[in-house]
Structures are given as C-alpha cells and as structure tokens.
Image (spheres, rainbow, N blue to C red):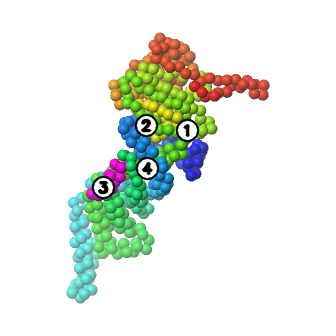
Amino acid sequence: LGGSLARWQRDWDNMKSIEVEIPAGSEAVAKDLDLYGGRSLFQLIGGVETPLGVQLLRDWLVQVASINDIEHRQESVRELREADEFLEQLKFLCHQLADGDSGPQTLLAWAEAPNSVDRRGWLARTARILAAAMLLGIIAALTGIVSLPVAGPFLLGVLAVNFFMTVVFAGRIHSLFNQVSSRHGEINHYLEIYRLVEKQPASSELLVDSKHELFDPSVNVLLATGRLGIIAWMANLRRHGILFILYVIFQFLFLWDLHVLNLLQRWKFKYGSHVRTWLDNLALWESLAAIAQLSKDQPDWRFPVLRPAARNDVVFAASNLGHPLLDNRSRVGNDVTVGPTGTFLLVTGSNMSGKSTLLRAIGLNTVLAQMGGPVCANDLSLSPLRIETSMRIQDSLADGVSFFMAELKRLKQIVDIAAQFEGDSQQTVLFLLDEILQGTNSRERHIAVTRVIRHLIDHRAIGAVSTHDLELGKTAELASAVQPVHFRESFEIVDGRKVMTFDYRM
C-alpha cells in the first residue's frame, strides 16, 4: 500500500530506485525521456527485483514490439491486475531472491557450460571406488573379518588419498557449488516462486503458454528445482553450523563433495538446457506483474489501441494525453495528433509554456504503449513507432565536441535511422526535437532545421518539433506538411506587478 501511495503521489524519495545499465544505442532517448534512474519511468513502474526481471523490463522500455506481442502483454496485464494477493506474494518472494549472493546469471552460466571440474566423470568413478573401499574396510575391521593391524594401514592409506583429493579439488568444487546456490538458499526461493505461479489461474495466451513451458510433465520445473534444492543443501552442508563436523567426517572418509558434484552434473545433463527458459519465464511473470501493479495504481489510465503501420497513414492520436511522471495535481492533458506520414507537429510557445512537456508526454506514452502497459490518456491509437529524440544535448569537451557539433551529430543519427527504416512495414520512426540548433544564429538555424525536418518527412518519419521560430511553418519546403499548435501565456496583475501565467493547454 505504501508503494502504491508513493507512486500515486509521485513521492520519488519513497519509491525504490534501481540503477540499470542503459541498452546500447538507446542512451539519448533514455536520457531525453527520463526512462531510467531517479524520477524516471522505470522507477515509476518499479515492482521488479530479480536481475533478469530488471533486465527484461529495462529492455521493454526501448524495444519496438510487434502488435501481436503488445496485445498479448495487455491481455496478461489486465488479468494480473485483479490478482492482488498474487502480486503481493510474487513481489515479496522476488525481493527475497534478489537479496541472495548468487544471481541467476551464475546459475545460468553453470547450467549451460560444459562440465569444468569432472568433464569425463573420472572423479566421480574414483570417489565411488574410494568410498566403497573405505566403507568395506571399516566394516571388515569392525566385524573382525580383517585384523586391525591389517585394516588400519589400509584405511589410513585411503584416508590419505581422500585428504589429497580434497586439498586439490575442494576449491574448484566449492566455487562451482557457489554458482548454483549460496548460503541464502536461492534455489528454495525459486521453488517458492514457481509454486506460486503454478497455483495462479491463467487465461491469457501469454501466461498460459508460459505455464505450459514451466510445468510440462516431461521437464516440470517444480520437480527439477526441488531436486536441485536438495543437491544444493548437500553442497552447502559445510556451511550449516554444527553440521560442519558431520561434513568433515563425510568428506575425509567418503569424499562427500565429489558425490555431490556428480549429482549436480547428472542434474545438469538432464535439465541444464531448460534453465534459461525457466528463468526467462520468471522474468516475464515479474515484469508483467510490475506493469499490472502500475495499471492498478493508475485506474484512470487506459490501454492503447495498436494499428498496423499502413504506409501513408501512420498516426499517433490521443485524447487528454498527460505526462506520466507528473502527479494528478500538476498534470494537464491535451488532445494530440502526430501524423499521418508526410506531416509533422510544430509546437510553438514561450519558455515554460509546456512545449517540452508535451514532447516528453508523447514519447513516454509511446514507450508505455509498446511495452504493453496502460497510458496516461483517455485513449490512444498508434502504430509501432521507433522513438528518436534530440532534447538534452550536452557539450563533450573531453572529446573535443562543442554543444553545436554534438547536436549536429545527434540529428544526423536520427536522419540516418529514418532513412534506414523508410521501407520498414512493421515500424515507423517517431522523432521528437526540442528547440534544436540553438547554438547558431537565427537565419542559419532556420535553414538547417528546415532541411533536417524535410529529410525526416521524406523518409516517412512522423514527429513533433518545438521551436521559437514562428516562421518555420511558412517556409515553402514545409508549408504543406506542418501542423502548427501553440501554447499561450497570460498576464495577470499581482501585487501591482504584471505576472506571466500558463494554462499548459495546447
């Protein structure tokens, strides 16, 4: 409840923030739209704890999914947002799992790698022979079949060999055990999560398919994870306080570690190729649950309608579109249309009137829509869009690049990407340019911005441009393509002074 209230109020200081590595190639868009970090869309969604869940949700923010995938996610989110108890339990269990020392990457690396310690199984065979020899020697000595003077040296010899093998191989074996599970018992946490998922009814196609992959009778994740949990407990016997004495006895008498290693390798041979699928499905459920919680916490948000990208009819159309990172008290919605192909939205107005906020609202809601979530609008219709932005350009003096050159390089990237996707029938470039090329004089800026926008339009991109250049829409190159909108300001007399105010209405 506390997290939902903080999310509703946009109380960022009381909302958990997870640092994530921005996917390569998405740095500019991520920074311009506040996708990651503090006071970001990723922080607003929250709800992911495990490394793979964080990674999947992170990637969904910058990937352009197919309409089919988006609709399947929407269906799953609608279903999960009604499962209050499941959402709470899943978040709690994933939090426990995230607190462990051994992450899923190490488990996955072990499951998919060839055996590194006992590749040919000779250690397992040797351990069985030595254990049998030790056991038979002890029995023979205790029953009197062999006299103690004869059995004693034999047992000491076997013990010496066991000690030698322990010294030589224990370090590598324990390192491998740590890949599977640390002392925190991550395997048991996985097992609890999969049990929770198994009990949760599913009707949406994506969740049904996921449960089929997880609980297929031939490779049921519950059975496999339960077995791995037992083996992991045996591997961690050396860490169980008073049982450490028992471990030492078993190790030097019977080479305990080598027998556990053999069990692990046999488990990996049978189930190792399925571990990635199981972990990916866990990340899927966690990410969908996070979006479902967002939908539950924002009941006035709506799911968008996705349309195929018809060649000359790509449109982003929304009513009462708001900036999702602003709370209800400060958010102002606007009816916004960007497109169709061959046109662009020209946004003018004074500083602080709402131009940049509108561009970010368009971008952020596109991100929400394409990850399968609800959007901050009464309704939204759009085609799959690849977002490209130029909003927060900084100098790069260390690289010898000025503000102006850095912005030119970014604009060239956007134009090149638009050209690359010009013939793509699955997605269209959506460009969002905020007061670009401020670092030059007004005449050269006017000419340069005109040419950049013309190139983007000719490559079938759609987008919005904010500017103070009121003449931009009157140029011959852009007059037929421009869709001009304006944010106005008002003046009021307050304490005898004229004060500028804004209503943020487009």
N-term mark: 1 or 4: 4
Please tell me which residue is depicted at 56% across the width and 48% down the height of the picture.
4
User: Where residue 111 sits in the image (x, y, percent)?
Assistant: 31, 55
| Residue 293 image position (x, y, % from top left) | 50, 47
Q: Which residue is denoted by mark 1 in the rendering? A: 325
Q: CA distance from mark 2 to mark 4?
A: 17 Å
Q: Is residue 323 above or below residue 413?
A: below
What is the number of the mark on residue 370?
2
Circle 1 crowding by C-alpha within 10 Å: few under 14, some 14–19, many from 20: many
Magenta segment: does it hold 103?
no
Distance in Å between CA atoms under marks 3 and 4: 20 Å
* 1 vs 3, front mark: 3
Mark 1 and mark 2 lie on one chain; the one further toward the N terminus is 1
Of the 4 image quadrants, the one containing the C terminus is: top right
Q: Is residue 307 left or right of residue 506?
A: left
Single out the residue that lies furthest toward the right.
496
Q: Which residue is mark 3?
A: 216
The amino acid sitting under disc 2 is Gln
| Element assignment for label 2 | helix
Which residue is under mark 4? 286
